Image (cartoon, rainbow, N blue to C red):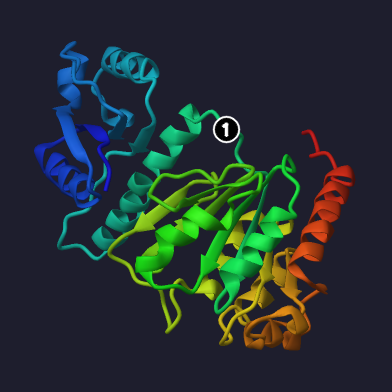
Amino acid sequence: MSTLKIGIVSETRIQQHYLKHTVEECGYCVATSVLVEELIIGNYPSENCDAWVIDVDVERFDKEQDQQSFEQWLYGIEQPVILGEGHIYNAAEAEFAAWARQLNKKLLALDGQIQLATQPHQKAQHVWVLAASTGGPEAVKRFLDAMETDLGLGFLYAQHIDRSHIQALCDTVSRDSGYYSAIASHGDVVCENNVIIIPPQHYVELQRNGSLVSRSQQQWRGIYTPSIDQVVSNVSALYGEASGVIFFTGMGDDGAAGCRLVALHGGQVWAQSVSSCVSPSMPQEVINTGYASKIDTPENLAIHLKTFIKNQCTHKQPLPSY
């Protein structure tokens, strides 16, 4: 999944074993693994690592000089660091599974952290979901062709589609528009003027920092892939008032449950007018919930969104200073 090289610093060989196993389970390579006592005596690892997993309790150092030596090395690290407190549970203990899940989650977010630090494009300030099924590609293309750029806006596009057609969808959906489209991959950052297409074959999750985690072993819940309910619930929980979802033409009721969470978090729920749909059941189910505040053609929804984002930015309150 990734070519990241991870360095490990631990207190014991047992810790090393568990950390190495968890890192490799995430698909990463362990480039170096050293004990903290080796760092203290000046045996610094020379391997070029992309990130570090350091699980050390500095309070357990016998000498203040040892603590200072370790901290001096730690402060000189330029790569991302996952820092623990030196306690790694035994696999036989009940808490071990929870510890492993938390470390796994932090490790999977590393690609995104590194890309955020190096990618040249601006991270999107607003993230909206484009949701569609039958007839969706044409409707979404009409929307994007009419959509203005440079609004600080990025899209996640959840389209019910067979995995064999997703590349063709990516090649055509944003053609002739000012938006760049790509199929979501692990570590991608949702940038402004981008349309990230969610693949149907495995679960993709947005992180709070704007990057994506692709869980190749985890499937979408329910009968629809990708699950629009899961996508919009994830995005709205993180972006709140800076998020929204537009339901385009399609069959089924996927998204009707998720749109309630979007509204609960202060996001927007819009829908394509049923008279302009190839298949109206998906937007109709959303309209029936009462949460759709805008209902119009794809072209007009683009105009509404431009106005909405500009008004939202104009009236945005400054963050309080403490």
Image point (27%, 43%), residue name: 2
Q: Nearer the viewer, residue 200 or 72?
A: 200
Q: Position of residue 147 (x, y in %)?
A: 74, 52
Residue 243 lies, with reference to residue 317, above or below; the image says below
Residue 184 lies, with reference to residue 77, above or below; the image says below
Q: Nearer the viewer, residue 95 or 116?
A: 116
Q: Which quadrant would residue 40 be assigned to in this image?
A: top left
Q: Is residue 273 left or right of residue 224?
A: right
Residue 274 lies, with reference to residue 124, above or below; the image says below
Q: Which residue is the site of mark 1?
A: 121
Q: Position of residue 144 (x, y in %)?
A: 67, 56
Q: Is residue 80 left or right of residue 21?
A: right
Q: Is residue 280 left or right of residue 132?
A: right
Q: Is residue 173 visible?
A: yes
- Amino acid tagged 1: His
Q: Which quadrant would residue 122 be assigned to in this image?
A: top right
Image point (49%, 31%), residue name: 119
Label 1: which secondary element: loop
